[in-house]
Image (spheres, rainbow, N blue to C red):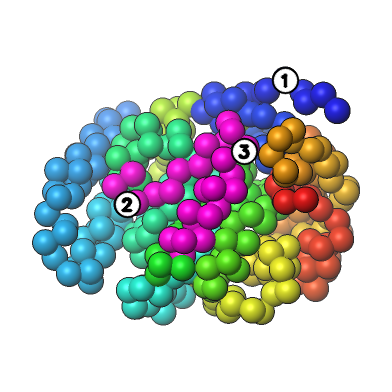
Amino acid sequence: MTAAAPAVGAGGATRHSWMPVSPCGASCLTEPAPAVALMRRVLRLCAAITVVLGALLLAPLLFVFGRRVRDRMVRAVFAGVLRAFGVRLVVHGGADLRRSPAGRGALVVNNHISWLDIVAVNAVRPMRALAKKEIANWPVLGGLVSRAGSIFLDRERLSTLPATMAELAAALRGGSLVNVTPEGTTWCGLGSGRFTTAAFQAAIDGGVPVRPVALRYRLADGRETPEPAFIGPESLIDSVRRVARLRGLVLEVFVCPEIAPGRAADRRELAALAQSAVDAALGRHRVLAFPALEMAVPGSGLVAQPARTANSGPGSAKSGSGTANSGPGSANSGSGTAKSGAGSVRSGGRVRAR
């Protein structure tokens, strides 16, 4: 089979046929959101840059302090970035994650909506991340993510995936908390993608638990909003400007109970358990709409599976690019359905070994 020509993804990055696909784009940003005045936007951007530059200058001093003091300082930096943009962070649960001892590794997975996701997770508990290599060059966040010991994934070269997953497994086995966004791309938040499975194999190989985390962005009046999403072909600068413009943005973080090693039979079941936990925290149901198409990637020993799923979320309806969403009354799938679906119908842009 001949692979299709690469397309353009979020931030103008090249998107190859094996990469997970999100139908989200400018069409998701239809409802007007409350905005602050131009001067407030400028002040927010200046405040965020000041926080990040200050953190980069002080970074060498962090190693003078013990882990607990260092974690508090890093949390303060990421929380400062959120405050600079006028974002109110609300955390549900997670006290055990914040108190977890050093040297106890875990794979922390969350739904992926915005560049703010990694800021929020680190404001709860500082950790390493599995990130696309382009993030290292991002303004504002790139330096912080790099200095946090991120493991970078070259999505342009699928042949590097096994080595990257081996590095991830070694980091987990060595006691690191590592944050991964297994959807593989950003969604608007009103819809979401399937969790791919490669990182969950690293958790199994490392013998560590999986900690699901659910993220939701809403306005002060309680309405869920896609405005902070980093989606479609827009640049990071465009997304940052839109966030700086928002009034009353609230970022909710739901820290779910961890999934102990050995609870799942394989990585597909483990991914399904984690996604069910995230969906439950957000009050959503999920059903599979179409079987995924498989395409061998020459010379890699891997099979790429394009994302083709259906989601149902509270009060939302959306379709496009082989994805359909419906309200909670139209389709109901519990964790048992998600579990069996992950093993029998492959979807969500998953890349698996043959």
- Amino acid type shown at disc 2: Ala
Question: 230 or 162, which is in the foreground?
Answer: 162
Residue labelled with disc 1: 5
- Amino acid type shown at disc 1: Ala
> Is there a contact, CB below 8 Å, between mark 3 and mark 2?
no
Question: 120 or 284, which is in the foreground?
Answer: 120
Looking at the rendered structure, the secondary structure element under dot 3 is helix
Of pointers 3 and 2, the one earlier in the residue sequence? 2
Using the image, determine if residue 105 lies above or below residue 237.
below
Neighbourhood count class around disc 3 (C-alpha, 10 Å): few under 14, some 14–19, many 20 upward: some
Q: Which residues are magenta?
A: 146-172
Outermost residue, top side: 5
User: Measured from the top left, where is residue 347 in percent x and y?
Assistant: 78, 50
Looking at the rendered structure, the secondary structure element under dot 1 is loop
* Residue 307 in sight in this render: no
Neighbourhood count class around disc 1 (C-alpha, 10 Å): few under 14, some 14–19, many 20 upward: few
Q: Main secondary structure of the magenta part?
A: helix
Question: 154 or 69, which is in the foreground?
Answer: 154
The residue at the point 28 percent across, 60 percent down is 75
Would you identify the image quadrant in which residue 142 lies? Answer: top left
In reply to whether residue 313 is colored magenta, the answer given is no
Question: 278 or 41, which is in the foreground?
Answer: 278
Tell me the number on the disc at residue 159.
3
Q: CA distance from mark 2 to mark 1?
A: 35 Å
Neighbourhood count class around disc 2 (C-alpha, 10 Å): few under 14, some 14–19, many 20 upward: some
